[in-house]
Image (cartoon, helix red, strand yellow):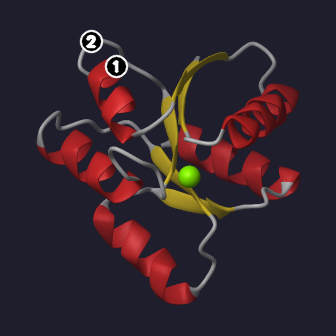
Amino acid sequence: MKFLLVEDEEFNLIVLEEMIKISYPDVEIVTANNGQEAYEMLQTNSFDLILSDINMPIMDGYTFIKKIKDELQLQTPTIAVTAFAIQGDKEKLLMAGFNGYISKPIDMMELHKILEISLLV
Ligand SMILES: [Mg+2]
């Protein structure tokens, strides 16, 4: 399996990667620092799962999900990793095309659960 992690803060990227490796030690993890970088990678590479931050420079998570759904027509399960935890934002994330979301700081059990559900689809 191959996952794409999109996140502008290096520390968050490392934490997320380490947490994923606890549940999925054999997964290949590729990282991108913003939506634009990830979008370019997706033009020539395919992944089993994408986890993306929302607040990023150059291209944010909302623009990123819209572009991969509309322009690349990707069906890859995509999880928003967001600092926003209020209900309105959760609905907005799902409406934008994300298959699920997880709040920062990331809870290990919650991450494990959302990865399991997303990979079943
Ligand atoms: Mg960010």
Q: Which residue is mark 2?
A: 44
Q: Amino acid at mark 2?
A: Thr
Q: Which residue is mark 1?
A: 41
Left-right relation of 48 to 45: right
Are there few (<14), some (14-19), or many (20+) residues within 10 Å of tag 2?
A: few
Cα separation, mark 1 vs mark 2, equals 6 Å
Quick one: SS at disc 2? Answer: loop
Image quadrant assignment for residue 107? bottom right
Q: Amino acid at mark 1?
A: Met
Are there few (<14), some (14-19), or many (20+) residues within 10 Å of tag 1?
A: some
Quick one: SS at disc 1? Answer: helix
Residue 14: percent from left, percent from top:
76, 31
Q: Residue at x 63, y 67 (%)?
A: 83
Q: Residue at x 78, y 56 (%)?
A: 106
Q: Residue 111 versus residue 37: which sits nearer the camera?
A: 37
Q: Residue 117 versus residue 36: which sits nearer the camera?
A: 36
